[in-house]
Image: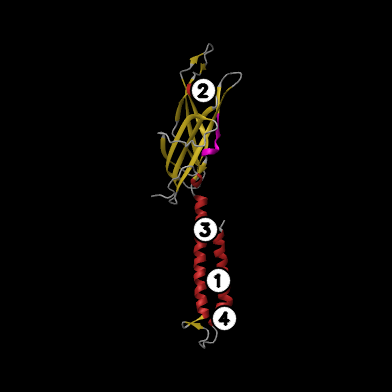
C-alpha cells in the first residue's frame, strides 16, 4: 500500500496533467502580442515547465514507494518459532524383561529455533542466548545481559536454524525456589539483501512442574512481554544499516 505522501504526489500529478491540458495548451496558442509573456516566455510555457517538473517528482516518488513496498514484502523476517529441548541422560539400565530403562537426566540443553519467514535470506546472522533463574515477575530494571554463548549463520527463506545451545544442570533447573523461576532469552541480528540490518529479541519463561502420578519433571515455555520485539521496538539500540 502506498504511503499518504506518495498518494498526495499522485494527486499532484493528475492535477498537473489537467492543468497542462486545460490551461497550458490554450495559453501557449494565444496570439503572441507580448502581453502574455514573462521574461520573454509565454505564461503557458512557464506552466508547462512547472507541470512537467511536478510530473517528474510525482513519478519518482511513486517509483520509490513501490521499491519500499517490494523491499518490505521480500526482505528476511527472523523470529523464534519455539525452544528446542534435549534431555541429556546418564546410561540406561536393563530391566528384568530385557528392555532398556532410560537413565536419569543430568543436563538440559536448550536452543532457540530461529525461523526466517521472509522470501530472501537472512545473512551475517549473529545470535546470543542466555538462561538463568530470576525473580517473577522480572524486575523492570532487569537489562537482559548478554552471555558468552554466541553463534553465527545464514537463514534461508522459509528456513530454520538452531541457536547455540545453553546447558543447564538438571539439579539446578529442577529445584523449585519460592518467588523465582528460570528464563531463557537472547537476540539475533542479521542483514537482509537490501543493505539493512535487523534485530529480534526474545525471552521465554520456563514453566516447570512434576506430574502428580509419575513424579516426572516436565517443562514448557511462555513468551515474556518484556523482551520480545524486533527492530526499532527492541530494548537495545543497534545499527540499522550495513557499515
Mark 1 and mark 3: Cα distance apart in space: 21 Å
Q: Nearer the viewer, mark 1 or mark 3?
A: 1
Mark 4 or 2, nearer chain start = 4
How far from the left and from the top, in percent, is residue 177? 53, 23
Residue occupying the far left of the picture: 243
156 or 70, nearer to the observer: 70
Q: Is residue 147 left or right of residue 27?
A: left
Q: Nearer the viewer, mark 4 or mark 2?
A: 2
Q: Are marks 1 and 3 in contact (CB under 8 Å)?
A: no
Q: Neighbour class for label 4 at 10 Å: few (<14), some, many (≥20)?
A: few
Q: Neighbour class for label 3 at 10 Å: few (<14), some, many (≥20)?
A: some
Is 21 located above or below residue 240 in the figure? Answer: below
Question: In this figure, which residue is indicated by the disc labeled 2?
Answer: 174
194 or 144, nearer to the observer: 144
Residue drawn 50% across the image and 61% down it:
63
Mark 4 and mark 3: Cα distance apart in space: 35 Å
Mark 4 and mark 2: Cα distance apart in space: 87 Å
Mark 3 and mark 2: Cα distance apart in space: 53 Å
Residue occupying the far right of the picture: 213
Q: Residue 26, which numbered label?
A: 4
Q: Quadrant of the N terminus?
A: bottom right
Mark 1 or 2, nearer chain start = 1
Q: Neighbour class for label 1 at 10 Å: few (<14), some, many (≥20)?
A: many
How far from the left and from the top, in percent, is residue 82? 53, 35
Question: In this figure, which residue is indicated by the disc labeled 3?
Answer: 66
Residue drawn 52% across the image and 65% down it:
58
Is 198 located above or below residue 104 in the figure? Answer: below
Residue drawn 50% across the image and 73% down it:
50
Mark 4 or 3, nearer chain start = 4
Question: In this figure, which residue is indicated by the disc labeled 1?
Answer: 16
Secondary element at image label 4: helix
Q: Which residues are magenta?
A: 220-227
Amino acid at each position: 500500500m502506498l504511503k499518504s505522501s506518495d498518494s498526495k504526489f499522485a494527486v499532484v500529478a493528475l492535477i498537473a496533467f489537467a492543468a497542462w491540458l486545460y490551461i497550458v495548451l490554450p495559453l501557449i496558442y494565444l496570439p503572441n502580442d507580448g502581453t502574455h509573456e514573462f521574461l520573454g516566455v509565454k505564461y503557458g510555457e512557464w506552466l508547462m515547465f512547472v507541470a512537467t517538473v511536478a510530473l517528474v517528482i510525482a513519478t519518482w516518488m511513486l517509483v520509490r514507494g513501490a521499491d519500499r513496498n517490494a523491499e518490505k514484502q521480500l526482505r528476511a523476517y527472523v523470529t523464534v518459532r519455539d525452544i528446542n529441548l534435549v534431555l541429556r541422560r546418564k546410561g540406561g539400565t536393563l530391566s528384568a524383561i530385557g528392555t532398556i530403562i532410560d537413565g536419569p537426566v543430568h543436563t538440559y540443553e536448550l536452543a532457540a529455533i530461529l525461523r526466517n519467514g521472509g522470501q530472501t535470506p537472512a545473512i551475517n546472522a549473529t545470535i546470543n542466548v542466555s538462561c538463568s533463574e530470576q525473580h517473577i515477575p522480572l524486575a523492570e530494571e532487569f537489562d537482559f545481559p548478554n552471555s558468552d554463548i554466541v553463534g553465527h549463520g545464514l537463514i534461508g527463506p522459509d528456513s530454520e536454524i538452531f541457536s547455540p545451545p545453553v546447558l543447564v544442570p538438571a539439579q539446578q533447573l529442577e529445584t523449585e525456589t519460592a518467588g523465582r523461576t528460570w528464563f531463557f532469552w537472547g537476540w539475533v541480528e542479521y542483514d537482509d539483501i537490501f543493505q539493512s540490518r535487523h534485530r529480534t529479541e526474545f525471552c521465554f519463561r520456563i514453566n516447570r512442574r512434576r506430574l502428580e502420578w509419575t513424579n516426572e519433571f516436565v517443562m514448557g515455555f511462555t513468551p515474556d512481554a518484556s523482551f520480545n520485539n524486533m527492530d526499532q521496538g527492541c530494548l537495545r539500540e543497534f545499527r540499522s544499516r550495513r557499515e
